[in-house]
Image (cartoon, rainbow, N blue to C red):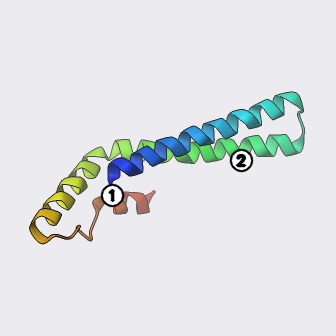
Amino acid sequence: MTDRELMIERIQNAIQALDRAHAAKSDLHKDVNTENIEAFRAHMQDLYNELDGIKRALEHQALYGEDELINLFSQLFSGKPTPYRHVAEVEHKK
């Protein structure tokens, strides 16, 4: 999966999380109870996590571009993708 595909997937996941949070908000608006409050909180946490992943990617976008170039050169010269990715370090540090 390329970094571009990963970013597209993250954006799609964030949109889905937003839709779930919005649905939970509607349920909470109709009936305020512990179950609906907890569901809303859980969906908002999921949305936060998805958006945080996008934020980290944007903060380190130079690494994403660098990894893409390194991978491209590796494939051109050796015929294989590079086994090492700087982005993996960023993802691991969260």
Amino acid, disc 2:
Ala
The residue shown at (76%, 37%) is: 24
Q: CA distance from mark 2 to mark 1?
A: 28 Å
Residue 55 lies in quadrant? top left
The residue pinned by badge 1 equals: 87
Relative to 6, does residue 83 appear above or below in the rendering? below
The residue shown at (64%, 46%) is: 45
Between disc 2 and disc 1, whose residue precedes?
Answer: 2
The residue shown at (73%, 35%) is: 23
**Rendered image: mark on residue 64:** none
The residue pinned by badge 2 equals: 42
Q: Are marks 2 and 1 in contact (CB under 8 Å)?
A: no
Specify the quadrant that holds the N terminus: bottom left
Place of residue 18 in the rendered image (x, y in percent of width and height, measured from the top left): 62, 37
Q: Nearer the viewer, residue 54 or 23?
A: 23
Amino acid, disc 1:
Val
- Is residue 77 something that shows in the picture? yes
Query: Relative to 85, is 37 on the left or the right?
Result: right
Which residue sits furthest left?
77
Relative to 9, does residue 91 appear above or below in the rendering? below
- Is residue 51 something that shows in the picture? no
Residue 70 lies in quadrant? bottom left
At mark 2, the secondary structure is: helix
Residue 81 lies in quadrant? bottom left
At mark 1, the secondary structure is: helix
Looking at the rendered structure, the number of numbered marks drawn on it comes to 2
Place of residue 53 in the rendered image (x, y in percent of width and height, measured from the top left): 47, 48
The residue shown at (40%, 51%) is: 6
Crowding near the residue tagged with mark 1, few <14, some 14–19, many ≥20 C-alpha atoms within 10 Å = some
Query: Relative to 78, is 10 on the left or the right?
Result: right
Place of residue 86 in the rendered image (x, y in percent of width and height, measured from the top left): 28, 60
Place of residue 91 in the rendered image (x, y in percent of width and height, measured from the top left): 41, 58
